[in-house]
Amino acid sequence: MKCSSDISYKIIAYLFSCAIFFMFISCEEDLTKQNGSQNKNFPSQIINNANIIQRDSGFITLKAKAPIIEKYELIDSPYIVARKGIDIEFFDKKKPKVPGKITAKYAKIFDYKKFYEAKGDVRITTNEGQRFATQSVYWDQKKKRIYTRDTVFATMEDGSTLVHANGMTAKDDFSEYTFYNNSGDVSAGKISKQ
């Protein structure tokens, strides 16, 4: 009799230790699954009152100011966002004292793709004095192209004004541009109507 009770206690102790072991393993697996699926789309850096200067061979090419800039670097497609607006001055080596300007209520930058987007009351002034107003602009820096499909209100350096109902595409230095579905007061220039 004594022998069978010892065996039953050993079996109960063995089963109890197995149950505890499996309980720990299942908890560990749940924690692993939970940690693996955590959202990584949060800013890794936040810059308040950002004042950024970009240089190329010592020459200032860009100055940017924003109330807040957030960098999202822990995801597959990292990006930078300025949710509270941005004010950018861009410089041309031929006219370093007269910068072009872009302002917008929102901007997103995919630096690795060299792709930029600006949205919300976008205003562009070239260093030639041309002014463009629209609701969104996209800049593909690799292709050196700026484009939008939103209505563009353009004022040229000579004072002529145009409304482009279906947007525009342009070289990023605005030396050439194409407007779509135009109306307004036009004088001679580099405008291509489509």
Image (spheres, rainbow, N blue to C red):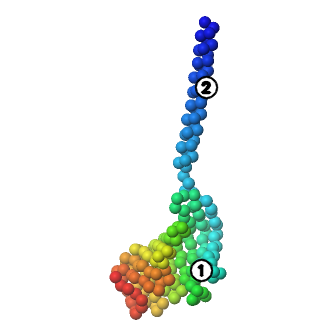
Left or right of residue 49, residue 129 in this image: left
Q: Can residue 71 be seen in this view?
A: yes
Q: What's the distance in space between the residues labelled 1 and 2, CA to CA?
A: 68 Å
Please tell me which residue lies in front, 112 or 105. 112
Disc 1 packing (10 Å; few <14; some 14–19; many ≥20): some
- State how many labels appear: 2
- Above or below residue 120? Residue 33 is above
Q: Which residue is drawn at 40% across and 82% down?
A: 178
Residue at the disc numbered 1? 61
What's under tag 1, amino acid-wise? Thr
Labels 1 & 2 near each other (Cβ < 8 A): no
Residue at the disc numbered 2? 17
| Tag of residue 14 | none
Q: Which residue is drawn at 59% across and 10% down?
A: 4
- Above or below residue 137? Residue 11 is above
Q: Quadrant of residue 81?
A: bottom right
Q: Residue at x 54, y 67 (%)?
A: 112
Q: Residue 49, image x and y in percent?
A: 64, 69
Q: In which quarter of the image is the C terminus?
A: bottom left
Q: Residue 176, image x and y in percent?
A: 44, 85
